[in-house]
Image (tube, rainbow, N blue to C red):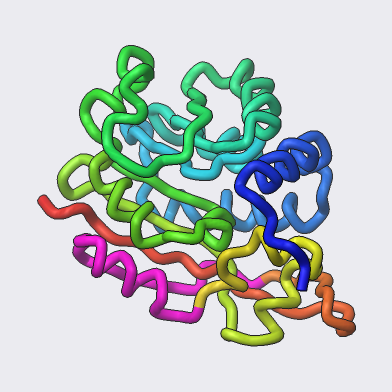
């Protein structure tokens, strides 16, 4: 098999891809479906303080920002963050933190600018990010510290089947950087329960056609949305 991509290689790859990211047709289409479905599904409103984990270039964030009080985009790729910063110039309530969230207190330097850092976020959401996270349970546990009591965590990612269908989402050269080839229904919800969240729910938010990398030309994938609430 291919050699394992180190954490540093992984971020280097995302840094390299950042400049072209927003012109990828699949990314544009997935993001449009997410931007259409998430506000209603998550009850977004103008007073809401949000964190977007794995915000990338801010392609989704820029559509969410006008509908909420603020969004703090968090990502570990500096290349992606540079693209994000360009979009944030047009949206005063888009903030950015180049971080890998693993424990409480990592965002303290943003407390003056971001209400959610001071008071806890109303919503932490993530889009097409969790399949890159080797320890999703640990990340979900860490995110609880950043939510208000009763605040919502939401993970949107692609549904996998545990086999070839999920694997075909990425070309094989990207596999070392893929922790999960999509998520089986119930998997994200189970981690949320284990991480101490309540009112866990899961739904298919949308379906999308994608060209695949296993010899078939394309397949339908589902955007799976798992949500839960931090204990009151």
Q: Residue at x 24, y 34 (%)?
A: 120
Q: Is residue 4 left or right of residue 188?
A: right
Relative to 33, does residue 164 appear above or below in the rendering? below
Please say whether residue 200 is one of the residues in the magenta stretch.
yes
Relative to 154, does residue 203 appear above or below in the rendering? below
Relative to 139, does residue 161 appear above or below in the rendering? below
- Quadrant of the rendered structure where residue 170 is? bottom right
Tell me where residue 220 appears, x and y as whole percent: 71, 78
Q: Residue at x 45, y 31 (%)?
A: 71
| Farthest residue, direction left | 232
Q: Nearer the viewer, residue 96 or 223?
A: 96
Please say whether residue 151 is one of the residues in the magenta stretch.
no
Q: Residue at x 54, y 53 (%)?
A: 127
- Could one spot residue 53 in this view of the protein? yes
Q: Is residue 13 left or right of residue 84?
A: right
Q: Nearer the viewer, residue 64 or 174?
A: 174
Q: Nearer the viewer, residue 79 or 71?
A: 79
Q: Is residue 64 left or right of residue 77?
A: left
Picture mark count? 0
Q: Residue at x 65, y 42 (%)?
A: 8
- Quadrant of the rendered structure where residue 30 is? bottom right
Tell me where residue 3 appears, x and y as whole percent: 74, 63
Q: Is residue 200 left or right of residue 64?
A: left
Tell me where residue 161 appears, x and y as whole percent: 58, 85
Tell me where residue 114 appears, x and y as whole percent: 35, 21
- Could one spot residue 22 in this view of the protein? no
Give the quarter of the figure containing the N terminus: bottom right
Query: What is the span of residues highlighted in magenta in the rendered image?
Result: 184-207
Relative to 102, does residue 105 appear above or below in the rendering? above
| Farthest residue, direction top | 112
């Amino acid at each position: 098999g291919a050699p394992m991509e180190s954490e540093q290689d992984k971020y280097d790859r995302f840094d390299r891809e950042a400049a072209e990211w927003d012109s990828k047709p699949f990314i544009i289409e997935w993001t449009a479906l997410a931007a259409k479905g998430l506000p209603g599904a998550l009850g977004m409103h103008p007073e809401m303080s949000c964190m977007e984990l794995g915000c990338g270039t801010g392609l989704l964030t820029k559509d969410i920002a006008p509908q909420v009080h603020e969004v703090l985009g968090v990502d570990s790729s500096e290349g992606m963050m540079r693209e994000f910063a360009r979009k944030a110039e047009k949206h005063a309530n888009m903030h950015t933190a180049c971080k890998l969230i693993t424990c409480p207190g990592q965002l303290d330097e943003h407390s003056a600018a971001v209400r959610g850092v001071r008071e806890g976020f109303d919503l932490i959401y993530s889009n097409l990010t969790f399949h890159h996270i080797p320890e999703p349970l640990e990340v979900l546990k860490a995110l609880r510290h950043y939510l208000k009591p009763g605040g919502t965590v939401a993970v949107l990612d692609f549904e996998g089947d545990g086999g070839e269908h999920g694997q075909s989402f990425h070309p094989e050269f990207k596999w070392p950087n893929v922790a999960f080839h999509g998520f089986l229904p119930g998997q994200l919800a189970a981690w949320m329960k284990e991480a101490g969240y309540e009112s866990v729910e899961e739904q298919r938010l949308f379906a999308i056609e994608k060209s695949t990398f296993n010899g078939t030309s394309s397949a339908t994938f589902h955007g799976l949305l798992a949500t839960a609430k931090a204990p009151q």
